[in-house]
Image (cartoon, helix red, strand yellow):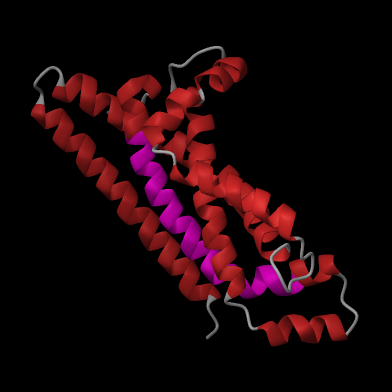
Amino acid sequence: MWQATVETLYMTGISVLITFVLGIILGMLLFLTSPGNLWANKPINLVISAIVNIFRSIPFIILIVLLIPLTMLIFQTMIGENAALPALIIGSAPFYARMVEIGLREIDKGVIEAAKSMGATTGTIIWKVLLPESMPALVSGITVTAIALVSYTAMAGVIGAGGLGNLAYLQGFQRGHNDVTLVATIIILVIVFAIQFIGDFITSKLDKR
């Protein structure tokens, strides 16, 4: 049980970190290339938007199957917690990117215009205006995404990725050990509640409204 918990925390932690970075990059590109923004470019925006929508719409269990060649190329195996990472990241980054875009759209346009009028470069606007102003929304979004990732790790576990999902299915469900399934479920719930608590706490500290 302890090993399965560590595997679940490992898969979730690594996926959240990489998803946070990739999601912000994709979300920022979606925002900046949209009409009326700093890098307004409709064709590029449509391409990025289409990629995000496609991967956001594929059910996770199907995405795992579709990414088998990529996973084999990187890890030479489909078994274990590392093998679940490509599907976890590719499945969650587009989802988070949309949340990043929504957070950026909520920023007062006047703040951006004021920065531009003072001669701020695009890089300065991104680092000094867009990211700080949207940070409460970004943290809130990654909290929701992290909770979704916990459920994704449980699904990945069913097909051999390890973690609590794998333990609950193989040792609990298939062998009729309902106590194993129950304890694994309780631990997953504790992880989810902990993520939500930490996310809400950080968001409240960042939100200056």
Residue lying furthest top:
76
| Span colored in magenta | 128-154
Image location of residue 138, percent across then percent down? 55, 64
Q: Residue at x 57, y 61 (%)?
A: 100
Q: Quadrant of residue 173?
A: top left
Q: Is residue 7 visible?
A: no
Q: Residue at x 37, y 24 (%)?
A: 162
Image location of residue 143, percent across then percent down? 44, 57
Quadrant assignment for the N terminus: top left
Image location of residue 144, percent across then percent down? 41, 57
In the displayed structure, does residue 123 sit left or right of residue 106? right
Q: Quadrant of residue 105?
A: bottom right
Up the image or down, 77 lies above or below 202; here it is: above
Q: Residue at x 62, y 78 (%)?
A: 107
In the displayed structure, does residue 182 sit left or right of residue 208? left
How many numbered circles does the render carry?
0
Up the image or down, 53 lies above or below 199; here it is: above
Image location of residue 195, percent across then percent down? 39, 54
Q: Is residue 88 visible?
A: yes
